[in-house]
């Protein structure tokens, strides 16, 4: 009976496997997963409650209950963030109508399907014979066509031959990349603005520059962020906090 009681007690104490609670939406610098050896997370990675992460610049986390958390050069444990535990919006939502932001109150469905379990950079994306550095990760995931511009290793992960880009299935999850050319323009005057396209490409746009938004359909301005949107010749002043849908 004692043995049975111990077994029942152990069974009752067994921890359930943890599931992802947030996703890495965009970043201006590499975001490191801390451990015995720090590794850089790819944009679009699903984040677990026990993940201890080090954002080396601006980073935007989307939590699957609807909350958003902006990191600015800080270290956090994902499961300790209030945003990872609640089901609510934490940044006011707006839609752009007739050149003006109009409040939207509807809560979006779960964001989990937008993110991937493939959380790290494949080794084949980097120069053969050397360990990837933070600079390598930055080039691969935070610059346009980063992985394509890296030197290929002798053997690549996955299939050796791929169909031409026009015949490939489009990425259906959040990923870093160029927003596209033309379209509206955004002058970021203070802090940072996060952008997302209709193909789920994301980018962090730091202050002091004017950006072509290309296919962008969403802008997230943290508290304190300021920007000017120029669209079809109309200027719109944007002040954070704001989660703005352009269409």
Image (cartoon, rainbow, N blue to C red):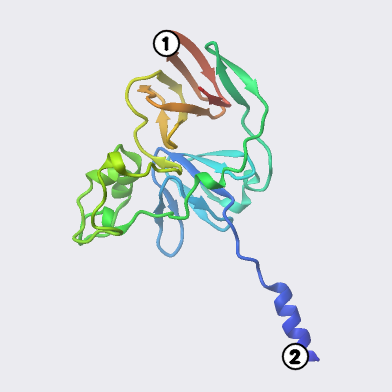
Question: Which label sits in the foreground, 1 or 2?
Answer: 1
| Chain-order first, disc 1 or disc 2 | 2
Residue 147 visible in the picture: yes
Q: Position of residue 129 (x, y in %)?
A: 20, 62
Give SS at disc 2.
Answer: helix
| Frontmost residue, 172 versus 65 | 172
User: Residue at horizontal 36%, vertical 22%?
Assistant: 212
User: Residue at horizontal 53%, vertical 25%?
Assistant: 245
Residue 232's place in the image compared with 110, above or below, is above
The image's mark for residue 179 is none
Residue 85's place in the image compared with 187, above or below, is below
Q: Residue most toward the front?
A: 167
| Residue linked to disc 1 | 232
Image quadrant where residue 49 sits:
bottom right
User: Residue at horizontal 29%, vertical 47%?
Assistant: 135
Q: Position of residue 33 (x, y in %)?
A: 45, 55
Is residue 128 left or right of 132 when viewed as pictured?
left
Q: Residues within 10 Å of mark 1 (few under 14, many from 20)?
A: few
Residue 191 visible in the picture: no
Q: Residues within 10 Å of mark 2 (few under 14, many from 20)?
A: few
Residue 118's place in the image compared with 142, above or below, is below
Q: Position of residue 3 (x, y in %)?
A: 75, 90
| Residue linked to disc 2 | 3
Give SS at disc 1.
Answer: loop
Instruction: Name the quadrant of the N terminus.
Output: bottom right
Q: Position of residue 160 (x, y in %)?
A: 24, 57
Q: What is the spatial separation of the Cα atoms under label 1 and label 2, in whole angstroms?
A: 75 Å
| Frontmost residue, 59 versus 121 | 121
């Amino acid at each position: 009976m004692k043995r049975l009681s111990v077994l029942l007690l152990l069974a009752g104490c067994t921890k359930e496997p943890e599931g992802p609670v947030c996703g890495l939406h965009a970043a201006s610098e590499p975001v490191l997963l801390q451990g015995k050896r720090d590794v850089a997370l790819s944009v679009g990675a699903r984040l677990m409650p026990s993940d201890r992460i080090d954002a080396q610049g601006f980073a935007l986390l989307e939590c699957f209950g609807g909350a958003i958390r902006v990191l600015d050069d800080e270290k956090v444990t994902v499961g300790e963030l209030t945003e990872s535990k609640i089901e609510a919006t934490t940044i006011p939502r707006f839609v752009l109508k007739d050149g003006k932001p109009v409040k939207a109150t509807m809560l979006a469905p779960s964001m989990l399907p937008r993110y991937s379990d493939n959380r790290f950079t494949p080794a084949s994306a980097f120069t053969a014979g050397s360990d990837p550095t933070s600079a390598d990760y930055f080039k691969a995931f935070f610059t346009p066509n980063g992985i394509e511009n890296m030197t290929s290793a002798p053997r690549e992960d996955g299939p050796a031959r791929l169909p031409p880009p026009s015949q490939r299935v489009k990425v259906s999850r959040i990923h870093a990349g160029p927003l596209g050319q033309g379209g509206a323009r955004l002058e970021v005057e203070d802090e940072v603005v996060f952008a997302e396209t209709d193909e789920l490409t994301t980018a962090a746009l730091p202050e002091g520059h004017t950006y072509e938004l290309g296919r962008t359909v969403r802008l997230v301005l943290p508290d304190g962020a300021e920007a000017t949107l120029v669209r079809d010749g109309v200027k719109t002043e944007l002040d954070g906090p704001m989660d703005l849908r352009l269409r």
